[in-house]
Image: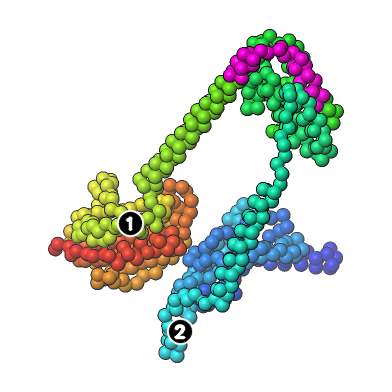
Amino acid sequence: MNIKKLFTILLVLLATPLWAQQKPLQAAIDSARIKIGSQANLTIKATVDTAATVRFPEGRNFGRLEVLESYPVDTVKKGAIYELVKKYGLTQFDSGRYIIPRLPVVINNKMVYTDSLRLEVKDVKVDTVKQQMFDIKPVIAAPSAFGWLWYIVALLALAALGAGIWWYVKKRKAQPKKEKEVFATPIEKATAKLKNLEKKELLQRGAIKDYYSELTDIARIYIEEAIHIPAMESTTSELIDAMRGAVQRRKMRLSQETFEQLERVLRTADMVKFAKSRPMDFEIAEDRDGIEKAIVVIDKSIPQETEDEEALANEILMAQRLKKKRRKRVIIGVSVSAFILLLAGIFFTGRYIRDNVLGRPLKDLLDKEWVTSEYGVPPVKIETPEVLKRFKDEKVLNNLPPNVSSYQKFSYEGFVNNLHIVVVTNTFKEPVQIDPEKAVNGELAAFEKNFKARNIVTKMEEFTSDKGFKGMRASGTMTITIPLTGKEAKVFYNILLFTQPTAAQEVIIFHEEGDTDAEKITERILNSVELAKAVQ
């Protein structure tokens, strides 16, 4: 074996472990310490072959850090491998030390995790001695230098409007009214209108719909005046049926061809008006000639009427019109009544569901008359917009821990407005030392179980109500899944914990984050808390 070939083999053998040792996934952060609200950039680098598929983590939060921005993936090709670089902008608005958890990256359908990283968020110090703090100033409307100008503009606009109305009315009065044309017979009227229709040149302007509308109106008006049937307010089918009845009643001699020709033109007009059909030019000409021919044939077939017969025909026409109007009124009346009943049903059903199933809007709850009640033993006295309902689960109540003598829970649950109010009281058989942090963690575990809570951020501090009662307060945010809809919502929660040697009392409230009405409700409830001591 020659030296060159041996050297090549050694290079390959040396490169292989180096490639095997290279980590396929790396994570780094540009700064391990940031100020509140500042951005830290997290970079995840995946080293894969060119045929690999990679999915980087997604979400609004990584642990307790909020994802401000997820940047596009950068790709760097290095021979037969790719370096895929994904960046995220992270922040946090509470000071403290945080862990960026191990994040999952899917490489070729296999889950690979990054290393966890630490990030410290520091307070922004404000020297209140050098920089004096002031209350927020109220909003003051700036005086307008052009206030008087708007009054002048408004007066001028009113004057112009009045002048325009006066000119329009005067012009209408000045125009001479056109004398109404009087025709001796319906056939003369129809013939004149057909000639006038051609003079309008609607076809030349492409107004096919208007042309057919006027053409069929001429035919309908003629039929109504000559045969005395309500043609204008009838559909095509109703018109043909009424004509057949009139022809039979008056013993007119009309061929089937005339009926078919008239019906064909009327249905073509319906298609043009309602289905936006466009006949060919020769078809339009045939329809116009067909209407004219049908009118002439109908006119020739009408027998001479006496005055009594004409009066009877007019009475029949009026009766038919009256019958149609009554039927329309009945249909409209029934339709309106059904619509009103439907609206009433929707209103009352919706109101029942809102008030008894879904819960009332928070604005209504805030503005209504509140209820002050005592709940549990030892009692917790609070003011709420609705009376809290007692929790009754025999399985829980019959399996209490050995040291717990009583457990009572009362709640209001609004799954649509995302407002939940819970009061819990426990009494113990013997004095116990309660760790507030463990108690809060127990409640958060219940959130995770019942509402699939995640991304939980917690802050604990001492609390004193307006009534002077002291306890521990845990507050923060979390993302929950609403049981009724399955949708996710970010909520803000408060947990008040009051401990005594043989009792513990809790008030728990959570609502959708950023809802100002819910924040007012929460503050009012928390400040109304009054407690009673447990009997030793």
Q: Which mark is residue 126?
A: 2
- Magenta span: 288-316
- Amino acid on which the number 1 mark rests in the picture: Lys
- Amino acid on which the number 2 mark rests in the picture: Val
Label 2 sits on a secondary structure element that is loop
Which quadrant of the rendered structure holds the N terminus? bottom right
Residue drawn at point x = 56 percent, y = 77 percent: 145
Q: Which residue is mark 1?
A: 368
Q: Residues within 10 Å of mark 2 (few under 14, many from 20)?
A: few
Say which of marks 1 and 2 sits in front.
1
Measured as percent of width and height from the top left, residue 96 is found at 45, 74
Q: Check contact, mark 1 vs mark 2: CB within 8 A.
A: no
Q: CA distance from mark 1 to mark 2?
A: 42 Å
Residue drawn at point x = 76 percent, y = 21 percent: 295
Asked which quadrant contains residue 369, the reply is bottom left
For the residue pair 163 and 478, the one nearer the viewer reads as 163
Q: Residues within 10 Å of mark 1 (few under 14, many from 20)?
A: few
Measured as percent of width and height from the top left, residue 235 is found at 65, 25
Q: Is residue 301 magenta?
A: yes
Q: Is residue 478 left or right of residue 392?
A: right
Residue drawn at point x = 45 percent, y = 90 percent: 130
For the residue pair 168 and 268, the one nearer the viewer reads as 168
Q: Is residue 414 left or right of residue 41?
A: left
Label 1 sits on a secondary structure element that is loop
Which quadrant of the rendered structure holds the C terminus? bottom left
